[in-house]
Image: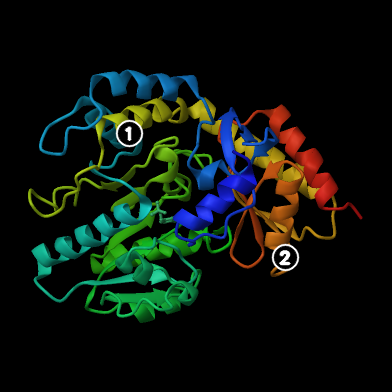
Amino acid sequence: MTYQELKAEENQYVMNTYGRFPIALDHGEGATLWDVEGRRYIDLASGIGVCSVGYNNPAVVSAITEQAKKLMHASNLFTTAPMVQVARTLVTKTGMGKVFFANSGAEANEGAIKLARKYSFDRYGAGRNKIVTLLNSFHGRTVTTLTATGQEKFHNYFFPFTEGFGYARAGDMMSVEAEVDDSTCAILIELVQGEGGVLPLDPAFVKAVEELCRKRDLLLMIDEVQTGVGRTGSLFCFQQYGVHPDVVTMAKGLGGGVPIGAVMAAKTCCDVLGPGTHATTFGGTPLVCASAGAVLSIVADDDFLQGVRDKGEYLKQQILAIGSPDIHGVRGLGLMLGIIVDDGRHSEFANKLIENGVLAITAGKNAVRLLPPLTISYPEMDEALAVMKQVFKPQ
Ligand code: PLP
């Protein structure tokens, strides 16, 4: 089917909730994708940070294939080895305590919110349930994670929301302290606000938030749904910020293309959610955990992570070297980068890149967001940079 034929059927049968780019993808190899009409693209988006180790990755494909032959799903009423192995790797590589498996980023954050409220309930009784998040954050699209998301544009239409949330300004401790009161149980932050515009938080601010959490026995919860699993050049972004979170959520890149989410809690609070308090039918099936295990066998490696930092720096420097008046800067960490353009022109540039064979997405009000597969090669990056030189005209 051609794109036009597919689009016509999509319009007829699929709810129109996404502003999709005008191509239909068919298959990929490494960081290169082809659409249904055979056009080739260098992928700097990886399905919004999901296809972390590229397309047709042999380790992932073989792990999924072998596991599909053995056992795809068992439910959480039974123990399965792939889940245990992924949890063991995550815990041993981070010094955290235990992991709960979910299916998406929003669901992981829902689990974190429940964990924080129960932690506080167990210690202090009812009433200490408020969670402070940051303005411009993004934590998901379920009703409660939308409430946690500090961007009003996502809130329209969907009231009433879950009670017990407050919003502070990123980088402003006075604003955080003003939001924290005796009813607060946790602070939930992204270290690089992804959807908000690829905005890394100031490390001193994050340290101060951590100190406040320790002083008032609040859980420090870090949403690593986008930043986690190698994306920013360390296995988790909190490791380069030098903080010790109580709860870390993840999703996207962990599965390498299959839907998975996880809540990882520190030793001090990892037994808060006991039997019967939280559950999901699909979370951590053997199939998705086999895939996550293969992803971690590649990404949880110091040399690989150094490679992510090197590639991120290379991309950033080469983009700046284009010297285009349209490019006002490049920000981000590792291979999570935002090319800053005039407010409101990010979609125009992302569309031009796609028309010329490079997949890129947008964030905030002025960022062309790059989240390439972490395995992208230097020749693939150079090909993408050559296209950027045409799209962002040098002076
Ligand atoms: N948290 C962050 C930081 C995200 O970037 C996202 C998605 O973009 C989510 C949560 C929601 O994840 P999902 O779309 O898998 O529910």
Mark 1 vs 2, N-terminal side: 1
**The one of 149 and 193 positioned closer to us in this rendering:** 149
Q: Is residue 324 above or below residue 314?
A: below
Mark 2 is surrounded, within 10 Å at the Cα level, by few (under 14), some (14 to 19) or many (20 or more) other residues, namely some
Q: In whole angstroms, how far apart are the C-alphas of marks 1 and 2?
A: 37 Å
From the viewer's perspective, tell me whether residue 223 is left or right of residue 52: left
Task: Tell me where residue 179 appears, x and y as whole percent.
Answer: 35, 79
Query: Given the image, on which type of amino acid does mark 2 rest?
Result: Arg
Q: Residue 373 in the image: state x and y as whole percent.
A: 56, 36
Give the quadrant of residue 86: top left
Q: Is residue 368 left or right of residue 184?
A: right
Assign a secondary structure to mark 1. helix
Q: Residue at x 39, y 52 (%)?
A: 243
1 and 2 marks in contact (CB < 8 Å): no
Q: Quadrant of the C terminus?
A: bottom right
- The answer to whether residue 191 is visible is no
| Quadrant of ligand 1 in image | bottom left
Quarter of the view holding residue 121: bottom left
Answer left or right for 98 relative to 228.
left
Q: Position of residue 250 (x, y in %)?
A: 37, 47
Residue at x 58% of width, y 51% of height = 7
Q: Within 8 Å: ligand 1 and the Cβ of disc 2?
A: no
Give the tally of numbered discs: 2
Return the residue at label 2: 345
* Residue at screen point 53% across, 30% down: 55
Name the one closer to the observer, 74 or 36: 36
| Residue linked to disc 1 | 288
Image vertical order of residue 70 relative to residue 222, above or below: above
